[in-house]
Amino acid sequence: MNATLMASTLLSCAALAPMHRQQPTWSAASVNATIAPFGFSVLAPNDLFRAEAVMDRAKNLVEVQWRYSAASDFLSPPEHFLAQKFAVTFIPTAVEFLNPAHLVVAGTHGTETIVEVWHLKIPVVTPTGLVGQTKKSARLVYKASQTNVPGIVRSLIHNRGATQSVFARFTGSHDLYEITWPADSGTGVAAVVLSAAQAPGLSASPYDEPFGGNHTTKGFVYILRVKDALHLHDAFVMLDTNRDGVIDSTALWGFNDFESNEALDAAKWIEYAGQAPVF
């Protein structure tokens, strides 16, 4: 993967409100007051394309943006750009790419938490630009009353060791959940896979900037962090060293830990996606 692309850093993190228990219903304003209002997910499927999913909670929209650069230069305006907006029947709260063909979209409708998986298609490059309908279908994979789950989904990270799975944080809990669903049809379940009692570092912050990737020596690495424009704050890091879909160890990393574990070396990452790369 192009080192310049990998080295680009996303520096948006809004002020975070304290975690609190569910409300009877949610509005776009109350969601934005509870979790970072500028949620998005970025994926670099190859050196030529960059995809980004951005939520507009006030309008119940998710926008999928595609950028194409023959020179793999995404720090400059790309040669081609395509943005498509898709309406949803709920307030979107978190998005996460599983791969170039699938985007997970979580949201809230009334007192229900909803998770969909969208089937996407990379647009076609033509002499005049990018063309094509990139959203092919949407499948409901999880739905639950917020009396049974702790609030709304605040962040998602693709579990790279499982085919139909994302790690999720909810607004009413510090625990880490895993949402899994059947391959063909039907809805899935959410279960705690790492409690704050087991890993006290989960309680250190709401961690509204999730990131995951495949590191050459560390295995699958999942990072929950708070970041501002100047400093790389301590982050909660989960390692799946044997890449089997199960978290093997956790730690709190500061800047020196990122350096010593080669997490700041773009060449060490085979693949990454999420809200904020660490490079």
Image (cartoon, helix red, strand yellow):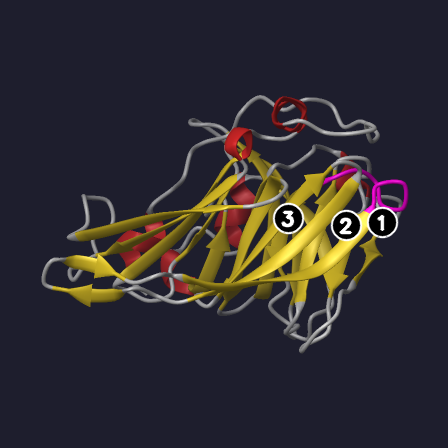
Circle 3 crowding by C-alpha within 10 Å: few under 14, some 14–19, many from 20:
many
Give the x, y percent position of residue 129. Answer: 16, 57
Badge 2 vs badge 1, beta-carbon distance below 8 Å: yes
Q: Which residue is mark 2?
A: 176
Q: Neighbour class for label 2 at 10 Å: few (<14), some, many (≥20)?
A: some
What amino acid is labelled 1 in the image?
Answer: Ser
Crowdedness near tag 1: few (<14), some (14–19) or many (≥20) residues, C-alpha within 10 Å: some
Q: Say what amino acid the circle numbered 3 marks.
A: Ala
Q: Secondary structure at mark 3?
A: strand
Give the spatial CA distance, label 3 vs label 2.
16 Å
In 3D space, how far apart are the residues under numbered discs 2 and 1 (Cα atoms)? 6 Å
- Against 128, residue 233 (above or below) is above
Residue 201 in view: no
Q: Is residue 125 above or below residue 13?
A: below
Query: Which of 48/265 is in front?
Result: 48
Residue sitting at x 77%, y 65%: 188
- Point out which mark residue 195 bears: 1
Report the Cα–Cα distance between label 1 and label 3. 21 Å
- Residue type at the position of mark 2: Leu
Left or right of 179? Residue 14 is left
Which residue is tagged 3? 106
Q: Main secondary structure of the magenta part?
A: loop
* Circle nearer the viewer, 1 or 3: 3
Sequence-wise, which precedes: disc 1 or disc 3?
A: 3
SS of the residue under disc 2: strand
**Residue 43 x %, y %:** 42, 57
Image quadrant for the N terminus?
bottom left
In the picture, measured across the screen, residue 75 lies left or right of residue 71, that is: right
Q: Which residues are magenta?
A: 145-153
